[in-house]
């Protein structure tokens, strides 16, 4: 198994083989929560106007997402695991979620046609993702860390790629160094300082928990929509 590393939107179309699209803060830490709380379908839509249109055409769908961290206008839930957890199962049970984000969902959209298979990556699913990849034993794996606004590398996404590579190949991994590299840099501090309601202080606590979920989320195109399936 060969593992290659890519980062941000500029490299998203350079992926090969089985691709793990990583977005720790926060898209793919949110995605498993939809299924945990019983959502029936999750649709990824990178195009903001198409996401709004889909929501207008389907009043029963739940629109979740953000543009550069700011929640989508008219959405009751931002791209925040804390907000999703507070809404809980009664809000999501048997519903369809439309998920739009600047980094993670955009990365899936850009990489999809180049990949043999796409799965979603974050710390909360990392060990399950690694176990799935080992079972599939693909010749090529791309770890695509989407970074801050899909434009520049983010410590948390690169660290998650490090962790996945460690689980897959046994490369060294120092969790204390990783904690320092993530928590004391700007992205995490934007949450921790608690100055913006849509960046809850609690979000990094959840997003940095390793291996909370024992399932994998795979992406497939269904009737021109990118849908997430729990496996």
Image (tube, rainbow, N blue to C red):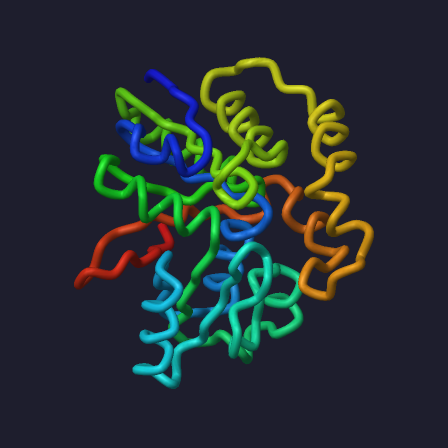
In this rendering, position of residue 62 left or right of residue 174: left
Quadrant in the rendering for residue 49: bottom left
Direction right: furthest residue? 193
**Which residue appears at 42% of the width and 44% of the height?**
120
Please give the count of numbered marks on the rendered protein: 0
Tell me: residue 94, above or below residue 122.
Answer: below
Give the position of the N terminus as an image quadrant: top left
Direction left: furthest residue? 223
**Which residue appears at 30% of the width and 58% of the height?**
227
Tell me: residue 48, above or below residue 32.
Answer: below
**Which residue appears at 55% of the width and 51% of the height?**
29
In this rendering, position of residue 213 left or right of residue 46: right
Percent coordinates x, y for residue 157 in the rendering: 56, 35
**Which residue appears at 73% of the width and 66% of the height?**
197
Seen from the viewer's position, the closer of residues 84 and 79 is 79
Percent coordinates x, y for residue 95 in the rendering: 41, 76
Direction bottom: furthest residue? 59
Tell me: residue 9, above or below residue 176.
Answer: below
Tell me: residue 132, above or below residue 167.
Answer: below
Percent coordinates x, y for residue 78 in the rendering: 57, 66
In this rendering, position of residue 24 left or right of residue 99: right
Quadrant in the rendering for residue 81: bottom right
């Amino acid at each position: 198994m060969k593992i290659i590393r890519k980062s941000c939107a500029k490299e998203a179309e350079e992926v090969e083989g089985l691709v793990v699209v990583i977005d720790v803060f926060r898209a793919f830490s949110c995605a498993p929560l939809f299924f945990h709380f019983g959502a029936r379908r999750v649709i990824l839509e990178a195009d903001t106007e198409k996401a709004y249109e889909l929501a207008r055409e389907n009043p029963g769908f739940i629109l979740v997402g953000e543009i550069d961290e700011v929640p989508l206008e008219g959405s009751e839930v931002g791209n925040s695991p804390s907000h999703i957890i507070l809404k809980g199962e009664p809000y999501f049970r048997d519903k369809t979620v439309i998920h739009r984000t600047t980094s993670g969902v955009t990365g899936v959209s850009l990489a999809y046609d180049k990949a043999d298979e796409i799965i979603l990556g974050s710390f909360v699913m990392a060990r399950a993702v690694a176990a799935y990849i080992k079972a599939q034993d693909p010749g090529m794996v791309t770890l695509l860390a989407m970074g801050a606004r899909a434009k520049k590398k983010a410590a948390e996404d690169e660290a998650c790629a490090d962790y996945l590579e460690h689980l897959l190949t046994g490369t060294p991994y120092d969790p204390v160094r990783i904690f320092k590299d993530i928590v004391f840099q700007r992205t995490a501090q934007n949450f921790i300082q608690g100055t913006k309601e849509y960046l809850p202080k609690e979000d990094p606590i959840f997003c940095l928990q390793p291996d909370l979920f024992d399932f994998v989320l795979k992406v497939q195109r269904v009737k021109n929509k990118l849908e997430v399936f729990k496996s």
